[in-house]
């Protein structure tokens, strides 16, 4: 029987090749979309699951409860880890990490490494990052040692053995007595689905030898602490003791605020709403939900298309089914055959979908940023679920065509009477309405998301970096570094293309890793939190930031400006100054140090991340006499590459060995929109696919309906109706269905978009014009798409249509 079914199925596919090709291609696209989104979701949920002790690892974070709300800080003091190990039952180990960026010199070549941690020797015991070379038990126990990734080892030494090699490490944030470090281990490259991403681990013991604050200090939060717990530890009991530990070692001097250390399961870290100073990207559950919903919509749409196109095909197979039933075929046999046929089509579609995904893997990974691999294909359970999905899909999408075809009475079918029941008409109308509603809703959603992102990117930021390039400052300890910088700056300014040069420790668009408390002399109880930015001379000129009062005349070495501070507008307002001029000359406390306010600048947006709690925060500027991280220059003309090559030549002359790294500020600032831009790209793609696939289904279903109405149209023509009247009648019914779809789509998409927009500090208002335009556009596409079928039916000869009666 199966062999017979197999022959008939492929005979029918060959007979109606074009329609079946549309069916298979549409189904394949839908399944491929679901595979891509499923890979993204499963990859995100797989983060850190390779750690053997994952269930016992907890991240320690700092919780602040204030009258204005709560805050969370992902960093801790250096002393909380040792204190927890010593005093809390259940804690068996801890490790600390200090994030850093260093320059490494190996074999006379300089390399800038941005993914670097200073780590306790217990780090590789708690976390499962296997070593290729070296001993985990002794790794990082001694100062001035480090371990590197296998890719980093090849970068430094090629095919040579890296173990035991001596390299030089320069960290601008630490005053290292010496720079020679020994490589004591090489670890496997960190997988994409690891929250911790690093290429180099430096021994934390080195820092302890430099500054006792790293050993066990409870003043300030500047590193990351992770603890390992015993199996079956009572977490709730442990959490209750955390407050006592906080009060003991870090007593709170502010009665209006409550501070406490808390525990976060490391398995939940990647999916936890962002807190201040968290490491690496955080999974956006809301965006993942929307993407999953869209993928499901695409799949439902292609299921509908299959049903619709199957019904169209059935029109020409109805007599075949009637003859089969007259020859004794039971309803069960016919149903089984159609489900078998659907299974074959589903199987072919699934194989084509997998092929599409494999061929487009690089493009999919580029859009969704899933680390360059199709993770789900490596999971054995996925293939079992995939086969089950094909079987269920065949059952669900094959049942309706089978039910429709086997419900026809043989005699009526052979006479050409198979118009179907009223229930069938309702079902078909519901299918059309649902596909129209999906197309309209997704079109409107695409416009709203696009408008919001464009609004964010184009909104006034009170800072101009259109023609600014930043180069990373030299971190190698050159003799007379500041003198070299001054000479380098003077040489750069001689270039006709350079307009101005300045320095800063954090670029616009970069999250400042330094936050301080500012207080006025008259209000020593209250304080304002602000970002602490160090800048050099000509900063406002280079970035075109308006000076509202006073001046900013910081020198590159800035010794004469110690004890001086510049506020932005928000900081001045928070401190209670009515106008910028009122702040000039006033004394303020900055973490206990007294500073004189010498200037107030416009409150430009250091960050403008869409969902930031506060996109324009108070900022404190101080003289860049500290080690600066960035040298910024404004250029004239339009050739970035030409100007950059001139600057690079000068840089290499003054700072040999130091790797040259530059950022175009416009691109750098827009990196903070990466997640939202990726989401928009995915939403647009899924929306377009849903609309196109939906239109395919609508065309098929309308073809089916028009074929059923052919005799009705023939009678209308016999009674004198002209072609235009018939077209109006047909489009009138279609318009009614579109109107119902609009009434469903508009409230639904308005609600979802309103919820999506409410998370943004600055947001657009939804415009009814967008709703109208999309609805009219979808209606226009439908009218054009089915015009051929409408004209074909309208031009039929009534004699040919009515002859079978």
Image (cartoon, rainbow, N blue to C red):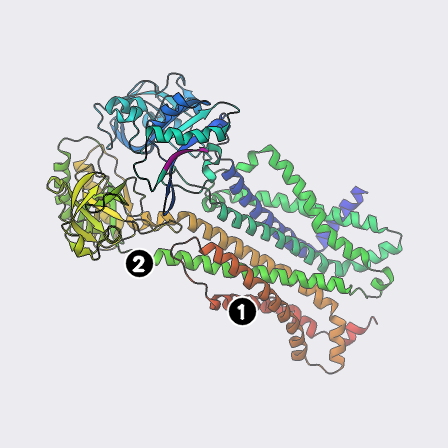
Please tell me which of labels 2 and 1 falls first in the chain: 2
Q: Position of residue 6 (x, y in %)?
A: 76, 45
Please identify the quadrant where the N terminus is shown: top right
Residue receiving disc 1 = 776
Most extreme residue toward the bottom, as rendered? 720
Q: Residues within 10 Å of mark 1 (few under 14, many from 20)?
A: some
What is the magenta segment's predominant secondary structure? strand
Residue 155 visible: no
**Element assignment for label 2:** loop
Q: Quadrant of residue 782?
A: bottom right
Q: Quadrant of residue 63?
A: top left
Q: Which numbered circle lies on residue 460?
A: 2
- Between residue 669 and residue 328, name the one nearer to us: 669
Q: Quadrant of residue 487?
A: top left
Query: Magenta residues, as a range?
Result: 259-264
Give the left or right position of residue 175, taking residue 356 as reference: left
Q: Is residue 261 magenta?
A: yes
C-alpha distance separating marks 2 and 1: 33 Å
Q: Residues within 10 Å of mark 2 (few under 14, many from 20)?
A: few
């Amino acid at each position: 029987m199966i062999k017979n079914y197999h022959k008939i199925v492929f005979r029918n596919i060959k007979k109606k090749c074009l329609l079946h090709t549309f069916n298979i291609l549409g189904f394949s696209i839908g399944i491929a979309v679901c595979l891509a989104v499923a890979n993204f979701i499963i990859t995100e949920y797989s983060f850190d699951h390779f750690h053997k002790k994952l269930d016992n690892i907890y991240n320690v974070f700092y919780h602040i409860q204030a009258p204005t709300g709560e805050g969370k800080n992902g960093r801790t003091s250096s002393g909380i880890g040792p204190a927890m190990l010593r005093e809390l039952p259940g804690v068996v180990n801890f490790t600390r990490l200090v994030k850093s960026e260093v320059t490494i010199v190996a074999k006379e070549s300089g390399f800038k490494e941005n993914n670097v941690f200073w780590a306790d020797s217990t780090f590789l015991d708690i976390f499962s990052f296997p070593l290729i070379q070296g001993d985990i038990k002794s790794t990082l126990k001694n100062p001035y040692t480090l371990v590197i990734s296998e890719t980093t080892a090849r970068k430094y030494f090629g095919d040579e053995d890296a173990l035991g090699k001596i390299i030089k490490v320069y960290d601008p944030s630490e005053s290292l007595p010496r720079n020679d470090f020994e490589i004591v281990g090489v670890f496997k490259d960190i997988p994409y689905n690891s929250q911790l991403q690093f290429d180099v681990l430096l021994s934390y013991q080195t820092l302890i030898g430099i500054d006792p604050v790293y050993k066990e200090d409870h003043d300030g939060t500047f590193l990351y602490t992770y603890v390992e717990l015993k199996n079956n530890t009572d977490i709730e009991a442990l959490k209750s003791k955390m407050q006592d530990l906080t009060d003991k070692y870090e007593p709170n001097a502010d009665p209006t605020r409550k501070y406490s250390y808390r525990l976060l399961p490391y398995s939940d870290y990647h999916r936890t709403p962002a807190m201040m100073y968290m490491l690496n990207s955080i999974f956006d559950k809301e965006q993942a939900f929307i993407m999953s919903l869209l993928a499901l919509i695409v799949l439902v749409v292609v299921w509908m298309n299959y049903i619709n196109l199957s019904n169209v095909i059935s029109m020409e197979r109805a007599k075949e089914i009637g003859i089969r039933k007259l020859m004794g075929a039971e309803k069960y046999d016919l149903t089984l055959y159609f489900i078998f046929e659907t299974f074959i089509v589903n199987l072919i579609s699934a194989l084509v979908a997998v092929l599409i995904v494999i061929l487009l893997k690089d493009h999919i990974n580029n859009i969704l940023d899933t680390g360059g691999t199709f993770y789900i294909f490596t999971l054995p359970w996925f293939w079992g679920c995939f086969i089950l999905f094909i079987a269920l899909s065949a059952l669900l999408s094959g049942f309706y065509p089978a039910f429709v075809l086997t419900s026809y009475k043989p005699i009526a079918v052979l006479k050409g009477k198979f118009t179907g029941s009223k229930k069938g008409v309702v079902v078909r109308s519901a299918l059309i309405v649902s596909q129209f509603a999906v197309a309209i809703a997704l079109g409107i959603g695409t416009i709203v998301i696009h408008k919001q992102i464009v609004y964010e990117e184009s909104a006034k930021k009170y800072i101009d970096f259109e023609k600014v390039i930043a180069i990373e400052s030299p971190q190698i300890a050159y003799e007379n570094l500041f003198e070299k910088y001054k000479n380098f700056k003077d040489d750069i300014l001689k270039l006709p293309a350079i307009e101005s040069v300045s320095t800063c420790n954090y670029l616009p668009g970069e999250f400042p890793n330094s936050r301080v408390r500012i207080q006025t002399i008259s209000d020593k109880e209250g304080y304002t939190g602000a970002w602490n930015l160090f800048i050099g001379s000509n900063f406002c000129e280079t970035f075109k930031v308006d000076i509202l009062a006073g001046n900013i005349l910081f020198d590159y070495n800035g010794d004469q400006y110690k004890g001086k501070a510049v506020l932005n507008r928000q900081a001045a307002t928070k401190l209670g100054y009515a106008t910028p001029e009122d702040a000039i000359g006033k004394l303020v406390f900055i973490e206990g140090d007294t500073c004189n306010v010498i200037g107030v600048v416009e409150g430009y947006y250091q960050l403008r991340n869409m969902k930031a709690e506060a996109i324009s925060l108070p900022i404190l500027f101080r003289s860049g006499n500290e080690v600066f991280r960035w040298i910024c220059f404004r250029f004239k003309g339009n050739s970035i590459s030409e100007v950059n090559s001139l600057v690079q030549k000068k840089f290499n002359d003054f700072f040999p060995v130091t790797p040259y790294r530059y950022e175009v500020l416009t691109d750098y600032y827009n990196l903070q929109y990466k997640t939202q831009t990726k989401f928009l790209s995915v939403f647009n793609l899924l929306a377009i696919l849903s609309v196109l696939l939906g239109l395919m289904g609508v065309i098929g279903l309308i073809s089916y309906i028009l074929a059923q109405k052919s005799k009705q149209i023939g009678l209308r023509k016999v009674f004198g109706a002209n072609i235009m009247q018939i077209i109006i009648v047909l489009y009138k019914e279609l318009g009614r269905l579109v109107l119902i779809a609009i009434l469903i789509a508009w409230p639904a998409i308005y609600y979802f978009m309103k919820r999506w927009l409410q998370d943004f500090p600055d947001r657009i208002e939804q415009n009814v014009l967008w709703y109208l335009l999309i609805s009219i556009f979808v209606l226009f596409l439908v009218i054009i798409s089915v015009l051929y079928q409408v004209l074909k039916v309208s031009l039929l000869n009534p004699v040919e249509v009515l002859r079978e009666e």
